[in-house]
Image: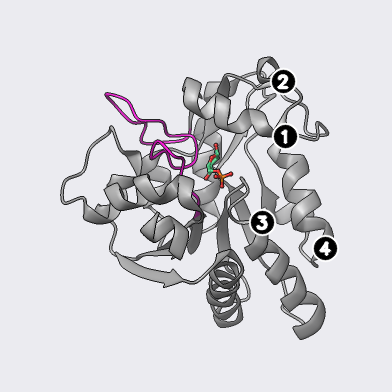
Amino acid sequence: MRVIVEKDYDTMSKVAANIMKEEINKNLSIVLGLATGSTPVGMYKELIRLHKEEGLDFSNVTTFNLDEYVGIDEEHPNSYHYFMKDILFDHININLENTFIPNGKSKDLHGYCKQYDKLIKEKGGIDLQILGIGENGHIAFNEPDEELNVGTSIVNLTESTVEANSRFFDSIDEVPKTAITMGIGSIMKAKNIILLASGKNKSKVIKQLLKADKITTKLPASMLLLHPNVTVIVDEEAYNG
Ligand code: GLP
């Protein structure tokens, strides 16, 4: 696990965006795995700048998002579909037909999960996966538990995640309690992984992750210790607390 510590959120975001830029320029048909949440927003802003000012080309890029709430409409302002369009896709030259986000409204959710992993495989697998991390160590919506899902699955969100995500909703009651998420195995199949974390509230979990020498389902992010190509990019607050 390579660790990069940057002085603040902006620098962390720019460093991550630059790595993405280099990877996209090396392979214009790259398959990216994308994350939602507040953490990657600065990186997405920088990617938009790189597109507008330096011509970074997304026209052949394919993206797969990690997760989506179950039962929420794509047009709902809190859906991850809406988020991705609003924060990134509407501002770059990506072909929306090449952007994939789990469908939390599918009539056959379990069948859909299998299809999602199959589609990732058909597109050649994820070249570069961006991850955030939950305060409880979740990656995507893989919550700490006795067992973790290998493939894309339907999961119940923990109370702490519902509470953390309630900041985006009018009230906590509106936060969906189930989600569809790429599994740990789907994430681990990515060739390269970048995990981002910023701010004091992530320092405890980052400390746990960086000092871990055992994997445990109680800290889903610890599974990344098994992956050969993970870069953790954090700001000083997340690193030092
Ligand atoms: C959310 C998402 C994760 C995200 C994490 C951290 O619940 N499902 O993909 O990485 O929580 O979010 P944030 O970046 O807002 O702290």
- Mark 1 highlights which residue? 79
Q: For this view, does 171 lie left or right of residue 159? A: right
Task: Select label 2 or label 4 by which is in front.
Answer: 2
Q: Is mark 3 within 8 Å of ligand 1?
A: no
Provide the residue span drawn in magenta. 131-152
Q: Tag 3, which secondary structure?
A: helix
- Mark 3 highlights which residue? 41
- Mark 4 highlights which residue? 91
Cβ atoms at labels 3 and 1 below 8 Å apart = no
Give me the C-alpha separation between circle 1 and circle 4: 18 Å
Report the predominant secondary structure element of the magenta stretch: loop
Vertical order, 61 against 225 (above or below): below
Give me the C-alpha separation between circle 3 and circle 2: 23 Å
At 48% from the left and 26% from the top, the residue drawn is: 160
Q: Amino acid at mark 2?
A: Ser
Task: Select label 3 or label 1 by which is in front.
Answer: 3
In this orientation, which residue lies closer to the viewer: 105 or 86? 86
Sequence-wise, the earlier of marks 2 and 1 is 1
Q: Amino acid at mark 1?
A: Ser
Reply yes or no: does residue 57 show up in magenta: no
- Mark 2 highlights which residue? 171
Cβ atoms at labels 1 and 4 below 8 Å apart = no
Q: Quadrant of residue 233?
A: bottom left
Q: Position of residue 136 (x, y in %)?
A: 40, 35
Q: Tag 1, which secondary structure?
A: loop
